Structures are given as C-alpha cells and as structure tokens.
Amino acid sequence: MKDRVLLKDKTGDFLGFLAERFEIVAPVERADAPAEFKELAESDVPALDGSKPMMTPKDYLLPRHEVLVKIDMAGGETKVETPLPEEKPRVMLCAWLADAQAIQVLDRVFLDRKFVDPYYSCRRENLVLFAVIPAEMRWSWFSGSVDDVETWKSSVDGLMYDLGDRFYIESTSEKGAELIASAPLSEASETDTAAKNKLWDAFKNTGLQPFAGKALYENLAWDDPIWEEMAQKCIACGMCSFMCPSCSCFDIQDETCGHCVERYRCRDTCQFEDFTLMGHGHNPRATQLPRSRQRLLHKFKYQHEQFGVVGCTGCGRCVELCPVNIDIREALNRTCVEPMEQKAEA
Amino acid sequence: MIDSQTTNNPITTLPYTPIPATLTKIVTESWDTKTFHAEFNDEALKDSFTYEPGQFQQVSVFGVGECTFCLTSSPTRKGHIEFSVKKVGSVTSALHDMSEGDLVGIRAPLGNFFPYNEWKGKNLLFAGGGIGMAPMRSLLNFCLDNRDDYGEITTIYGARTPGDLCFAYEFEEWNSKGKLHLTVDVGDDDWKDHVGHVPGYLKELAPSPDNAIAITCGPPIMIKFILPEFASLGFKPEQIYTTLEMKMKCGVGKCGRCNIGSKLVCLDGPVFSLAEIDELPPEF
Amino acid sequence: MAEIQDKIREEAKKALESGEVGVVIGWGAGSVPFKTTPVFIDKPQDADKLVWNPACTNNLAVYLTRWARDGKVGIVAKPCDIRSIVTLIREKQVKRENVFIIGLGCGGVVDTGLMEAGDVRMREITSLQWDGDDLMVTTEAGAVKVPAAQALREQCKVCHDRSPAISDVSVGDAVAPSEDLKIEIPGLSEDRQKYWQEQFAKCIRCYACRQVCPACYCETCFCDRIEPKWTAKKATTDEAWMFHATRAMHLVGRCIGCGECERVCPVGIPAVELARELNAVAKERYDFEPGDPEAEKPLLGAYKENDVDPAHHSE
C-alpha cells in the first residue's frame, strides 16, 4: 500500500478523476455559517482543509428533513410509496476523523439492530470515506481522550493530512488503496511522510483530558450531583444534539397536502421536554435533570454497552457552541476522574 | 424475527412503510376505550401475517400520525388483528372518530414477546388493571387456545368501575377455560363481584408461587403496589413479567426515545421480567 | 475590571449573608479562559466564584422566570440584561421585589468568533481584559491587543444604554453611551426577501435562539403546539421562515436587543436584526422603547386613540 500526495494546485484534476467514478460529497463553504456536506455541483468549491467549523456528515447521511413515505389517497385508492435515495458510488472527502468515527456509531444504530434503515443504507453503502487531519487542530477537539484513535483509522478508507501546499493521502482500506493507486497523485517523499507522522501525533495528543484512557462507562454514576448542576444551567435547546456528529434521534411527523400525506422524519433530541412525553401526559423524564443525564450516559455508557463503541468522538462542537458553556469534558473529568482519585486515595 | 420472504410483510426491508389495512369491526369497550379489528388489504399478507403474544404495532391515521398499540388479539385467531385504544391524544382521537370500512396503516409485528414456550406445564397468573388487560389478553387467549400446555390459568382483572372493564364479552371464556376474578374500585347496584384494588385482591386470593408465572400489566400506580404483594406471596423476580411503556416513534430501534438505560423498549421489550427490570436504571 | 469583580463578589456575599436572597445568579469562570458560564451561588463563601470580564456575554435574565417565581434572587446584570429584567417585570413574569439587581456599567462584551478569525490562537489564550478601548488578550506566547471594533459583539457597537436603568446596587462607573444608531426601517424588496430566505435556509431548528431569549418565556411555544399546528417541525426554509418571522412578531417592543439569539446560533442567522427592525417601527410609530422603565405598559398592551393604525400604514 503506497501512500501518495495531492499537490493543492492539482486539486482540480483529482476532483475530476473522482467525479468520473463517484458522486463526490464534501463540505462546501457558506456565508456566515459552517461549511456543509453536499454532493458537489460543478460550480462548488469544496472546503478541503478541515480547519474551520463545519456541519457534520450526518446532515448528509441523515438529512435534517427526509420524506419516508408518501401516501396518495386520490380517488378513494390508497397508494403508499417509499421514496428511497439513489444507490450509487459515493466518495466523502474531508470529514473530520471524529466525524468519520461518529459514522461508525450511526452505522450501528441504522444498519444493525434487527432492522436496517433503508434510507441511511442507500447513502452509506458504497461510500468511500476519506477523513482529513487539518494543519491546525481545533482548540475544542479531544478525540484522543475518548478512545484509542489509532483504531479509528480502520473506520475510514483513507486519510488526507494537510501539509500546507499538499495533502498527504494515506489509504487505510483496500477500497482506499485501489482508489489512490489509480488517481492522479504524486509520490510521497520521506519528508512528506515525516510531516504526516508529526501531524498525526498532534491530532492524537490534541486536548488530552484527565479522563483520557479511563473506562468512563464504569464510573459514570446515576446519582452524581453534576446532573443537577448541568440541569440548572441548561437552557434546553437542541444545539448540542443537532450539531453532534453521532446524535441521531429523530421524530416522525405527518403533513397533509390535498389528497397526499408526506410522512417525514426530522431531528429531535432528548433535551426537548416533549421527547418522551406520552399521549396520556406522563413523562418519564419530566425535568431537565434526567434529560441532562440521559445525553451523557447515552454516549458514554449505554452506547458502549450496546455496541462496544463510545458514542462521543470528541469533535468539540458542543464544547465550542453550548450557549451556557456546559463543557462535556469538564463534566466527564468531574464525574469520573475526581471520584476515582478519591477512591484511590482512600 | 418474521422473515419477509415467507410472509411478504415489508416490515423487515421497509420498516417505516405502513401497510394499508381496513377496519372491519369497532367494539366500544368503555366510555374512553374502543377495540379495533383490522384486516390487511393485501390478501396474501392477510393470510400469512403472523405474530407472537406481547408484540406491538404502529398504527397510522394518515395525515394525523402514528401511535403505538399492543396486538391485543391472539395469533391463534387468524385473519384479522385487534388493538385497543384509549382516547388520549390526536391519533387516538382520530381513531375513535373512524368507522368500519375506514383505512389505517399498520407496521407490525414489532418488539419481543412473552416467553410462553418456557412456561409450558406451569400455572399462569394474570393480574391486570384497566387498559393493562390489552397486552395480556393476547397471551391469555393464546394460552387458552393451547390449554393443554399449561396448568391453572387464573386471571385477576380490575378497573375503576364496572363500566371501565374491557373485553366483558370474553369473561365467560376466561372463567370457563380458566378462572377469572373481577374487581372494581367502586361498584354499582348490579355489581356482585369483588370491590377493591387489584393488589389487595391478589393478597386476599393468595395464589401459590410454586411452579407459577405471574404476568401483570396496568397503570404505574397499580404496578407499584402489586409488586410487593407478589414478593410477599413468595414470587421471585424471575417469575414476574410485565410490559413497559415508553413513547415510541419508529418502533424499530432507530429514533432513540424509548431507551431505559441501554435497553430499548421497542427492541428489547416491551416484555420484561422483573429480574430484568431490576437491572435497569430507575427511570420510569 | 478586577475592582468591579471584587465589588460584585462583596455585594453578592452581603446579600446572601443577610438572607436577602437565597441565590445569586452571575457569571463564573468558563471551561476555557475566553468563556464564562452561568453560576448559581447559594453560599456566601462561594461568592468568590463570580467573575467579571469581557467574556460575560450571557443575558442571565433568561433564568429569572425559573428562579424568581417563588422567592427573591440576586442577579448580576449588564445594562442590556437589566432591560430584559424590566420587560419581565412589566409583563408580570417576575415581581420587582423578587429580584435583587447588582447592576453594572458595561462598554460591551466580546465576540470570540471574531478573535478566532484574527490571528489569536484560541488554545493559547490565558485571559481577556479590557485595556482602555482595546481588548488585551493574554496568551502563552505573550499579550496581543485587539481593537474594540474588532473584538466587540455587533450589538455592543450600537448599544446606547450602557448604564443600569434600574438596580438595587450599582457597581462600577457609568459608561458613556455610544452614538445613537439610526436603524433603517427596510421596506419590502426582493433583495430583502432573498436575504432572509438564505438565512432561514440554514436553520436547523435547534431552538437555541428561543431558549436563550429572556423574552421567550412561553410555557409552550406556538411552534411546539400540536393542535393547532402552526408550523411543522421539519427544518425546511418555509417552516423556518414561519418560526423566525412569528417569533420576531412576538418580540416587537419586547426584544431589548441583547443579541443572544445571534450569538448562540450555530449557523449564523442574525435573528436579532428582525427584532431590531420591528422595534424601530415601534419607536417611529408609537414612540415605544423596549426595556424603558418609564413605560407603564407593554407596547401591545397600551392603546391610545391617536395610535397609528398599522392597516393604514402599509406603504
């Protein structure tokens, strides 16, 4: 498996090569808003360096609004139609590695668990996934604290390391190797390889937290006082979930238009009061405290128990964006590290 | 899991797509509860559709939405399925306004089921309150239809008033093939049976836990008070089964709202033994 | 700035010690040096957790409807936050006697996003301080001066109300107001429609704008209602338009322009612009200013015979 480099002034050739074989999905810059993953139109210039805020790839794989079923009741007949997305070879470029790993979490929800989600599956099957390691890591990243990121390389088909005037392109799967072997790329020099290794180390060590390497799922307590503290501050918006690369909870709603009904799904979150509110008025999570607890335990405990992977990949979006600075890293340090140290002292 | 190849039920491949079905009969059970009989419009599916007692379904009123109901009919009684609906919200109200011949959409069967195979040769004790009888009715009728497989089949069923008791048209069968004890919180002039809450009546009847399985469903307050009664009668957590209720949208383990700890009520439930529930975080 | 912080702590401590309030809501140190976080101080000895620095952005009045319902609470508040409190009192959401306001003069707070766009490496920041009109950013590599024009949040640049309108104790000196900014009342135009269409197309319906807003205190927001369903939950441009436009209409004469909605929006929708424009209309037609303690009634609660009829005012 030979690694190669893409000189940035040759990006057009590379994209052209890919476009002949794949639908290219990549982040595209927007005015006053984070770049968003979309299928590249010819006029689109992808934001390939991965250093600026971007929306998550989940917005492509699980659109914020997706029609699941169309029901046509014209003329007394009922036709139920299931509009599935087109299956075609796709390549996704420049997802943050944390976001790519989050796709592993989505896979376990949407491709396993007795039922396969056909909409997700249509986009996910035949997807070649390249993650980016930017020249400068964002201040909020803490991937190396939640997991051994070396193992994440097998979650993608390849990595693109931003080395300034070039991307070092490393393949981590057969699919990835095949692709870069035939692509219009240059050979990597030893200097390139050394620079790439340095960048990888920087990524691994970015934002390392006191809780790094600790088995969080064993130490998160149901009755920790931190849930109350978080709930006090929390204003119950859905930003942490909606901007999270692995939060995938959704709602299903009907909309009527004449004879037709569109049943669609849209984002929902455990932070909203009505998320678990039942028709007869009972709500098992009636206050913010159990809702704050649910989001954290879901990621660090329940998903670990269900899938053997951690539901948070340390992308740092909620750390950067939470309107009231509820910092998930701080919460984990407080709930896990401090009690463990106290235990060790005793 | 039902194989879609043999049943042509699209639930496994298109799990969000409701299958058109027609309401063939609507039974008024009480002032706020109706039982609906539905038949799939697709003849082949109507014949091949099968399920297990304890499983549930998502019923669509097109344009209004979907709601979760247990399959209250027994799979031994083929050709149609039944679900009982208490009028509480928008979908249930829309259902209550529907007439025989109207169209609904159904996604079924979903969830796990009562492990009735493990219970062969045992005495079964059903203790239900109000609409909680609906999920147990499927199992009760299933066991009565396989009468030789089980020992005694005893049912304690209670409601607020005589008018709140559902499935009165089956009481005779439940009492002849098994034993039925009825109770109400408040009786009326015609009421000849027991008056009192289900947990108290259970204590009074004092069934033996030996070689027995207890199945109980009802409002949370009843469950809260009945569990200690079972315990004091000597029933172990492994001998007690119930169904849990959480808000659901997808029913197929994706939408993320019905978890209790790392269990999803829609996939790992709705049927749980008390031993399993004791392992879950106290969130319901 | 350090002096003011000391005074805040002192006043909070006094109020807690005397039992005047059960809790003081203020800003505490954030998880990183360029952020602060709301804190709820209920013990006098914890008053030292309160901070005052250029990152004290949150309008803490949002917590009052939750906290000041059953008892008296203390709140550390900037002039804009105080205008929110005035609105809450006028709308009978909070009783004046249930709030103990530790009021501050304020020359503006920072937009950390702008700093990131500059040369400052966020990870290396150790503290933020005002130094005259400049923001002094101390980093591991040394101090960097960022001119206020570059560091201040947009609405702070146009704020003309920089001293507390009401307070129980006033901390720090009054700050001279900035030049009065004339907000243009935009007419209807295709350009304007296109602009907002593009803005709303970005909306992900996370409701951070609504949740962070002290004026959005409805028990059930119109857009969460099932019957009647005013707007669907889906994140499409039309539905987002319905949500933001209706929210803006609900905020006329009530939005005090703190800009929290704009600050927290993860996709950069300047929702406060809409409210600002509508407030300019309220000012022009009814001489009403949100957050003005002199006004007795809310804009929509007061009727005068010579009021302009909006129906005859659609040029």
Image (cartoon, grey):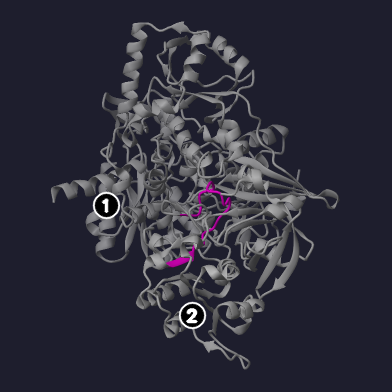
Q: Give the range drawn in magenta.
A: B240-259
Chain designation of label 1: C
- The answer to which image quadrant residue B104 occupies is bottom right
**C238 or A293, which lies in front?**
A293
Residue marked by disc 1: C9
Q: Nearer the viewer, residue C196 or C177?
A: C196
Q: Which amino acid does label 2 sit on?
A: Val
Looking at this rendering, what residue extends furthest in the front direction? B148
**Marks 2 and 1 close (CB-CB < 8 Å):** no
Neighbour class for label 2 at 10 Å: few (<14), some, many (≥20)?
Answer: many
Which of the image's four quarters has the N terminus of chain C?
top left
Does the rendering let one see residue C34? yes
Give coordinates of residue A103: x percent, y percent: 48, 34
Q: Which chain carries label 2?
A: B
Q: As rendered, which of A67 and C71 lies closer to the eye?
A: A67
Above or below: residue A312 compared with residue A161:
below
Q: Which amino acid does label 1 sit on?
A: Arg
